[in-house]
Image (tube, rainbow, N blue to C red):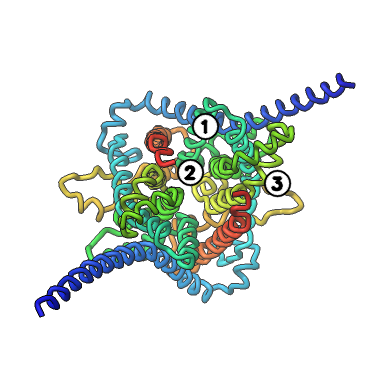
């Protein structure tokens, strides 16, 4: 009888200890999960909040007019988003032309060629570029870059697409170069050594082996940098002007030399203008936000798909 | 014939050298741009400091660049920025770190496949949207609990905090995933639970990456412009240390918001108020630069300890 009680109590203690340990683990797990779930909840809330206001807007303005219209004049209730979309795409394309070649070449140099001394100068330089507040870039584009480009003989307006786009390009160089360099540094040395063993030069190894092996990371860096360019606000508000304008395919140079407007700067304008919170102009901001959001989301998905498609091919 | 071969070889090495120069020039472009930006900021800041003494600028406690009596004391803006940064850090650092632990140590493949895209979406929301959400939804929600001004530091801090969660969690998670599995297995072998392994083995081993992620996220918060301009308002206010809670309920102005206001106030670009923009820009730049250096230092100090 005594024995039995003792065994019972020992077992109780054992299972009790085990059980409380397991219970504690479960609590930890739950807390961690809740923190992670919070970001999902917040994301969903943001999307829903945008969608609700956008639905209200689309109650006032026909979605077909919104997505196919070519005139954006909020004062006359003309809400055609295409001039803003083409404005955004133009900025993104030009900034990509600036940032992608320079960023990738910098990444190759940093990963394959640079001495530790050169790296110790270049890396902080890139980080400074990444740390400059965008509002500073905006003023520099407006005040210095436009003048500089005019000095080169270009006939530019005070506010113009070209200098805003170049500034956005400069801003995203560090994103392209640092993410691409990470991808290149992760390529195993054995691949490089095999290339050298076959008599390849450093250039051939860099472009024929390292870049293809790191391609998924390089593409991801492009897409992340471009979504940053699409969402950029301050530079384009300050340096590009506020004139929504369809991109004129017959006169691409003219389109660059003139002012334009992106989706982000139209959103800033919609809210800073003196209109009631119930007016279509104010609500248009949410439809724009949702459109912008859909574009950056699609780009992020694309980046993930590309990264997953090529991941670990060389590991 | 062999001379020809050699010639071919030297052409090849020539090409190699040219390519090297091209790559180096591309890399140098970023340095030159950085230097040019610094110089232009400096030149304008020097002009400003010839009109306003640096001592007055850095120690002054009133920022009234366009109203009489004109005063250029940057401290209210610096403290405004610090308030927002501190508030957003309180939100983003714990949530971001715990999310990273969950993603790296606990989450199943299925959970990750939902969480990672959601975090990326959060990172991709344009900052102007965050500003409006703060103004239109978060401020009224707070107001229902505690009375706050229309523009207040609290809701701006909350949205900035939400905005930088993905930075903390993704960089920290990368650092944790890079911790070798044998460390985890050694600990499990000693009978440690998953939580003990996560907090006593993985987090310390990934500390350099985690601290870097904190610092990068905080420099992002310091440089954030649209969300704070829209949600925190335009009232330069020196933080009142005797009433820390009150600070968050009132409107403040950050350095970035002041720059936006200055830029919008005068298009001619000649007034001292406009020039002060560059002095503020340079101050901001110095702060983020120091934080980036700090991040590098921390990362290199702890790098490869466990490899």
Tell me the CA gap for discs 3 and 1. Answer: 29 Å
Quadrant containing the N terminus of chain B in the rendered view = top right
| Chain ID of residue with mark 2 | A
Estimate the x, y position of residue A315 in percent, counting from the top left.
59, 49
Labels 3, 1: one chain: no
Q: Which of marks 3 and 2 is in front?
A: 2
Q: In this view, does A121 lie above or below A131?
A: above
Q: Looking at the image, which is closer to me, B148 or B97?
A: B97
Q: Which of marks 3 and 1 is in front?
A: 1
Residue B256 appears in the picture as rendered:
yes
Which residue does the numbered mark 3 point to in the structure image? Answer: A254
Tell me the CA gap for discs 3 and 2. Answer: 26 Å
Q: Looking at the image, which is closer to me, A145 or A223?
A: A223
Estimate the x, y position of residue A141 in percent, counting from the top left.
55, 39
Q: Looking at the image, which is closer to me, B83 or B301?
A: B301
- Image position of A296 (left or right of B245): right
Q: Looking at the image, which is closer to me, A312 or A79?
A: A312
Q: Quadrant of residue B259?
A: top left
Tell me the CA gap for discs 2 and 1. Answer: 14 Å
**Rendered residue at 36%/44% (across/down):** B207
Residue A91 appears in the picture as rendered:
no
Which residue does the numbered mark 1 point to in the structure image? Answer: B34
Which residue does the numbered mark 2 point to in the structure image? Answer: A134
Q: Is residue A232 above or below residue A33?
A: above
- Image position of A222 (left or right of B178): right
Decide: marks 3, 1 in contact (CB < 8 A)?
no
């Amino acid at each position: 009888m005594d024995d039995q009680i003792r065994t019972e109590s020992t077992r109780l203690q054992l299972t009790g200890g085990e059980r409380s340990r397991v219970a504690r683990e479960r609590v930890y797990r739950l807390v961690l999960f809740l923190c992670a779930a919070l970001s999902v909840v917040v994301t969903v809330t943001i999307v829903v909040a945008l969608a609700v206001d956008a639905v209200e807007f689309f109650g006032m303005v026909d979605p077909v007019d919104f997505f196919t219209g070519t005139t954006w004049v909020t004062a006359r209730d003309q809400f055609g988003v295409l001039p803003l979309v083409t404005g955004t795409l133009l900025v993104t394309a030009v900034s990509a032309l600036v940032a992608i070649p320079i960023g990738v070449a910098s990444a190759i140099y940093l990963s394959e060629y640079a001495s530790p001394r050169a790296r110790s100068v270049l890396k902080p330089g890139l980080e400074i570029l990444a740390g400059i507040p965008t509002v500073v870039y905006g003023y520099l584009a407006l005040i210095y870059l436009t003048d500089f480009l005019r000095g080169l003989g270009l006939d530019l307006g005070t506010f113009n697409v070209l200098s805003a786009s170049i500034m956005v390009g400069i801003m995203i160089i560090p994103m392209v170069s640092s993410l691409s360099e990470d991808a290149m540094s992760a390529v195993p040395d054995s691949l490089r050594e095999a290339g050298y063993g076959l008599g390849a030069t450093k250039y051939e190894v860099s472009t024929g082996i390292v870049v293809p092996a790191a391609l998924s990371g390089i593409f991801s860096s492009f897409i992340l940098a471009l979504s940053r360019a699409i969402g950029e606000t301050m530079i384009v508000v300050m340096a590009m002007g506020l004139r929504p304008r369809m991109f004129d395919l017959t006169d691409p140079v003219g389109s660059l030399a003139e002012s334009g407007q992106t989706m982000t700067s139209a959103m800033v304008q919609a809210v800073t203008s003196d209109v009631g919170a119930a007016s279509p102009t104010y609500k248009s901001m949410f439809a724009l936000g949702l459109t912008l959001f859909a574009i950056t989301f699609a780009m992020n998905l694309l980046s993930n798909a590309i990264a997953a498609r090529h991941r670990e091919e060389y590991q | 014939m062999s001379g020809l071969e050699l010639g071919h070889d030297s052409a090849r090495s020539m090409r190699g050298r040219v390519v090297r120069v091209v790559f180096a020039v591309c890399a140098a472009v970023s340095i030159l741009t950085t230097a040019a930006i610094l110089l232009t900021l400096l030149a304008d800041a020097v002009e400003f400091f010839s009109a306003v003494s640096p001592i007055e600028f850095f120690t002054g406690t009133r920022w009234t660049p366009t109203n009489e009596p004109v005063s250029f004391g940057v401290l209210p803006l610096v403290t405004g920025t610090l308030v927002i940064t501190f508030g957003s850090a309180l939100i983003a650092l714990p949530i971001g770190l715990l999310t990273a632990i969950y993603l790296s140590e606990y989450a199943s493949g299925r959970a990750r496949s939902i969480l990672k895209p959601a975090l990326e979406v959060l990172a991709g929301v344009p900052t102007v949207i965050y500003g409006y959400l703060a103004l239109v939804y978060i401020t009224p929600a707070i107001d229902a609990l505690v009375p706050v001004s229309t523009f207040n530091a609290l809701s701006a801090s909350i949205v900035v905090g939400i905005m930088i969660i993905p930075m903390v969690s993704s960089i920290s998670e990368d650092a944790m995933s890079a911790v070798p599995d044998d460390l985890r297995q050694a600990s499990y072998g000693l009978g440690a639970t998953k939580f003990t392994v996560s907090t006593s083995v993985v987090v310390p081993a990934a500390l350099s990456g985690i601290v870097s992620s904190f610092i990068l996220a905080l420099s992002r918060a310091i440089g954030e412009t649209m969300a704070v301009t829209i949600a925190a308002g335009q009232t330069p206010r020196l933080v009142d240390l005797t009433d820390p809670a009150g600070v968050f309920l009132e409107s403040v102005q950050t350095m970035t918001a002041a720059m936006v206001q200055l830029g919008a106030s005068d298009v001619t670009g000649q007034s001292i108020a406009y020039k002060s923009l560059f002095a503020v820009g340079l101050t901001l730049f110095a702060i983020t630069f120091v934080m980036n250096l700090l991040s590098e230092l921390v990362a290199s100090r702890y790098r490869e300890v466990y490899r």
